[in-house]
């Protein structure tokens, strides 16, 4: 068998991945119905979760030289465990990986990094996004604590997800909306103005840009708008 010679850039990437990659373990996988929205419980012994003050992103390996960022939610710092909420209903290497994961699998990841979003003290938190933002919103809700005022809306791909959102995440007090053109925009335009509101716009990047424009038109200032776009 002949020797395979990797291009220089692939050699660098391979060395970088071997050097930095950490190992965790998949503990359980649960599927919402229809089953392309997943909750994946993981054990990440290489992370110190005690000092998290804002929502984090974990860079997970989903294929050869392919990594995707997922937000840890519902974490327990003492046991180094958390849940990843993953919208796997579209084509892509990340979705394919998420649909293939099962309990007992090794999870390879590079570490956690800040999303630079955290709850605002003494403010009304308004979460607005699509279903890819559910894990991010759950993380912010945990950081905000039980006394925080949380409201908002999340547009979902399937009607059945609304009941599951309320059942599985009862403290995430956001209104589920059906997926239709303009549903979030209409909801946001009708939302009563409140000077103590801080908006967290999370999800598809084009949607986030459009929602931010609406808020600026309504007179909200830049410090009241926290935007986090996800490319799909």
Image (spheres, helix red, strand yellow):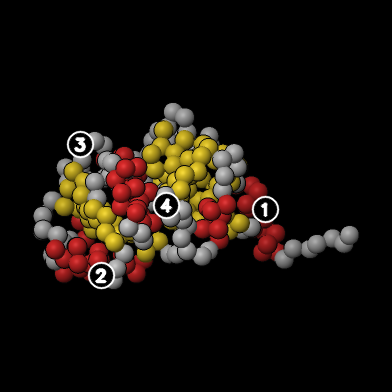
Q: CA distance from mark 3 to mark 2?
A: 32 Å
Residue 160 can be seen in this image: yes
Q: Crowdedness of circle 4 by 10 Å Cα count: few (<14), some, many (20+)?
A: few
Which-is-in-front pick, marks 4 and 3?
A: 4
Q: CA distance from mark 1 to mark 4?
A: 40 Å
Residue underneath mark 1: 15
Q: CA distance from mark 1 to mark 3?
A: 47 Å
Picture coordinates of residue 70 (x, y %)?
45, 51
Quick one: SS at disc 4?
loop
Whether tag 2 and tag 1 are in contact, CB under 8 A, the answer is no
For marks 4 and 2 on the same chain, the one whose residue lies earlier in the sequence: 4
For marks 1 and 3 on the same chain, the one whose residue lies earlier in the sequence: 1
Residue underneath mark 3: 147
Quarter of the figure that contains the N terminus: bottom right
Picture coordinates of residue 142 (x, y %)?
31, 39
Residue 226 can be seen in this image: no
For marks 3 and 2 on the same chain, the one whose residue lies earlier in the sequence: 3
Which-is-in-front pick, marks 4 and 2?
A: 4
Picture coordinates of residue 94 (x, y %)?
53, 58
For residue 118, above or below residue 176: above
Quarter of the figure that contains the C terminus: bottom left
Front-lying residue, 179 or 229: 179
Residue underneath mark 4: 33
Marking on residue 182: 2
For residue 107, above or below residue 232: above
Quick one: SS at disc 3?
loop
């Amino acid at each position: 068998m002949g020797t395979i010679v990797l291009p220089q850039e692939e050699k660098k990437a391979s060395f970088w991945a071997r050097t930095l990659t950490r190992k965790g373990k998949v503990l359980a996988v649960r599927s919402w119905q229809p089953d392309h929205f997943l909750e994946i419980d993981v054990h990440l012994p290489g992370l110190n979760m005690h000092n998290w003050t804002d929502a984090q992103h974990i860079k997970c390996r989903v294929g050869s030289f392919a990594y995707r960022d997922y937000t840890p939610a519902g974490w327990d710092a003492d046991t180094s465990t958390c849940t990843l909420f993953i919208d796997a209903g579209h084509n892509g290497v990340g979705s394919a990986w998420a649909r293939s994961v099962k309990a007992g699998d090794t999870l390879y990841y590079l570490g956690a990094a800040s999303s630079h979003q955290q709850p605002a003290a003494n403010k009304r938190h308004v979460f607005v996004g699509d279903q890819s933002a559910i894990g991010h919103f759950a993380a912010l809700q945990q950081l905000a604590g039980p006394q925080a005022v949380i409201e908002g809306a999340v547009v979902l791909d399937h009607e059945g997800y609304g009941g599951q959102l309320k059942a599985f995440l009862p403290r995430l007090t956001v209104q589920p909306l059906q997926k239709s053109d303009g549903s979030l925009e209409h909801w946001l335009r009708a939302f009563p103005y409140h000077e103590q509101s801080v908006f967290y716009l999370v999800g598809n990047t084009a949607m986030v840009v459009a929602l931010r424009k609406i808020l600026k038109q309504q007179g909200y200032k830049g410090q009241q708008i926290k935007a986090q776009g996800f490319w799909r």
